[in-house]
Amino acid sequence: MEKRPFGQNKKLNELIPGQKAIITAIKDKPSVTRRRILDMGITVRRSYESLCTWIYIMHSKRGSEKYFRFGDDMKTVVLVGNPNCGKTTLFNLLTHKNQRVGNWPGVTIERKSGTIQNTNIELVDLPGIYSLNSYSIEEQITQSYLLHEKPDVIVNVMDATTLERSLYLTTQLLDLNLPLCIVCNKMDELKKQKMEIQFDLLQKKLNVPIFPISANQKMGITNLIQWLNCHCFKSIKTQIFPKNIEQKITCMEQELPTTISFKRWMAIKILENDRTFLTPFHLKNTSTSMMNELENHYHMDAEQILITLRYQYIENIIKMTFKTKPKKTITDRLDAIFLHQWLGIPLFLMIMALIYFLSMGFIGSSISRVFVRFLQVCTFQIQNGMIKNNIEPWIIDLICDGILTGVGTVLKFIPQLLILFFCISFLESSGYMSRIAFLLDKIFTQFGLSGKSLVPFIIGTGCSVPGIMSCRIIKEDAERKMTILLTPFIPCSAKLPIISLFCSFFFSKNAWAVSFSFYVLAIFIILCSALLLKKIFFSKKGVTLFVQELPSYQWPNAKMILKDVGTRVFHFIKKTGSLIVACSIVVWVLLSFTWKLDYINQTFYTIEDSILASIGKIFSWFFYPIIGELNWAVTISSMQGFIAKEQVVSSMAIIQGVTSFSNAQAIFSPTGIFKNFTALSAYAFVTFNLFSIPCFSAISAMKQELGSKKRFFLALLYQMIVAWVLASSIYCIGTICKTLFF
């Protein structure tokens, strides 16, 4: 069959055995399609699980036809490097995708894939690692991919400013004898530090092509793409150990079966006494004799010998290729302040207080008022348009009093969310958050956590779901489960409308300070809960050894920050436009009809006779210790928060019967159903909704990550008990103090 140019579509039955194809759309189940592909003799470059995921994603985005894009010269390129070396930034630049980018480790948890535009190259972004061992989940993902997927070429992304640390991983990649090239990123920062690398000499010593680039400045990218697109990749063979070690490696390679790939790498692992590779090949006697010879010669254990020799090799290269030594940088000066033993944590709290001041204070409130006025005009035009077109009154009520009121009450907080997301993203990209993880590690360790737990907590400020998913970076099982349980306690974006609504009305003069107090309260609950869980359930469990890279401070890339903020806000709006709309319709229907299906606005009934009111009265006793009254409307609004936290505010607006985008004064009207709220009961009510059971999405993520139904239900029960006891205690103690002293 005559070859077609890459990118032309073909149906499944048009493919012939041996051809390579990229699935762009699929109709059948992934398992069925994969079986059909294999039966035809077509090479599948992915594992079963990843192929299924890939097909599902493509199916959801592309359509329902069985089409394949094919090309005989397809290439798979994989990005491997240390955390924070710029892999994801380079990935986004080459594929024009919008993966999460941050100047701190733990950003890429799983592998991501995309296609370099106008090429036949599939680019895979693997998690950041420091070595090819299997101590962490990131290392296991990377190691498994390289050993089983066998990419066409490895692009080793290195931070030019930390070349010595980056080269350790490079030496391990060389052991695989796979096609390899090196990308030295952050060349702009290297020049700022007045450092210079002799790349010609470095390339000669490593026997690997090297491309100096700057992903942020888009420098040197063209040369890399041209090499990937045109070059015929060849295996790299570079010997980094002394002759006596290389002889041992060669002897061990000969002992391995001929069918085994990556013999050199596996031989080194066996000499390091790695049981993962030692046991299956039954080479314990052979390896033991070789290791004894090495240990007697170097007077240290075999693994330490190989590690030491790697660093000696790296040290010699660094001495030959570096022309200048770094001087004291801005990063060093700033770390002297932000990592100070006594000033570090107070400065962190001051920064977080400033963020809440900007988002919840005068600036955020002012922008929000302007935004609300704009939305009010739009809503007014919609309502007038429906009246002029003689739309049925009940439809107008549904759209205006139900959907627009429910959705609008939530959307009006977008300006405040924008400021909050911008500030958090700025701190992440600048490199400051990794310092906070380092500082808090000493404190967290006392409570059964580590600095790694801060990563899910920070991510959880945007949404609890990715925060819970990011707990995978924690190796220790007990610590990971504790972090999964505690992450929903962090005030996320969905909880911000609740905080803003109540604080703007009951604490108008100090709204930002009261808002920040909830953040401090969340930290307090997390630490106390961690200590309690450690004492009762995990007393005999250890804590993950925390090794944290401290990247250089850098001025964040404005484009990346805007992309990150845009992604978070889009997720918030998408959720509001789907789940909140559905919930608002349900609330309006239940509020507008009696059990006899009589329309309240057309009868002598009141909302007290509605279906919603009767349901709320059944459970109103549960909230009596929190707000000091039996109020079905408060009960229903809070119960809605179990579906989505934003729905608390939405439900209150619909029940009160206010217009779209109304302010807090309208919701808490002296003649309204929420008129009995006081500053004390408001604070207690917000406390309960912030720390009770999270939304459905977060619950689903918790169930998946905990892996046990018993553990999952106990976690939900614990969160509910903590929220109820804390909120009730605040109201009770506050009432007593008010009675005694005021």
Image (cartoon, grey):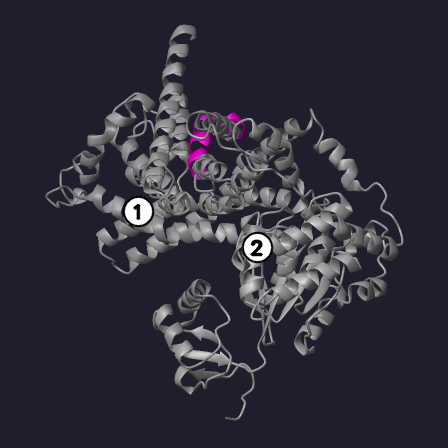
Q: How many marks?
A: 2
Label 2, label 1: how far apart the Cα atoms are: 61 Å
Q: Nearer the viewer, residue 358 or 494?
A: 494
* 585 relative position to 665: left or right: left
| Span highlighted in magenta in the image | 496-514
Instruction: Residue type at mark 2: give it.
Output: Leu
* 471 relative position to 229: left or right: left
Picture quadrant of residue 124: bottom right
- Looking at the image, residue 457 lies above or below residue 174: above
Does residue 18 show up magenta in the picture? Answer: no
For numbered disc 1, what is the local secondary structure?
A: helix
Residue 76 visible to an observer of this rendering:
yes
- Looking at the image, residue 567 lies above or below residue 503: below
Q: In the image, what residue occupies the spot 53% across and 50% down?
A: 137
Residue 557 visible to an observer of this rendering:
no
Instruction: Residue type at mark 1: give it.
Output: Ser
Q: What is the quadrant of the C terminus in the image? A: top left
Of mark 2 and mark 1, the one earlier in the sequence is 2
The image position of residue 211, as x and y in percent, is 75, 65
The image position of residue 221, as x and y in percent, is 71, 67
* 3 relative position to 391: left or right: right
Q: In the image, what residue occupies the spot 46% across and 74% down?
A: 23
Q: In the image, what residue occupies the spot 23% across and 52% down?
A: 393
Q: What residue does disc 2 label?
A: 278
Which residue reaches farthest top? 740
Q: What residue does disc 1 label?
A: 584
For numbered disc 2, what is the local secondary structure?
A: helix
Q: In the image, what residue occupies the spot 43% across and 50% down?
A: 377
SS assignment for the magenta stretch, majority: helix
For disc 1, the neighbor class at 10 Å (few under 14, some 14 to 19, many from 20) is: many
The image position of residue 293, as x and y in percent, is 72, 50
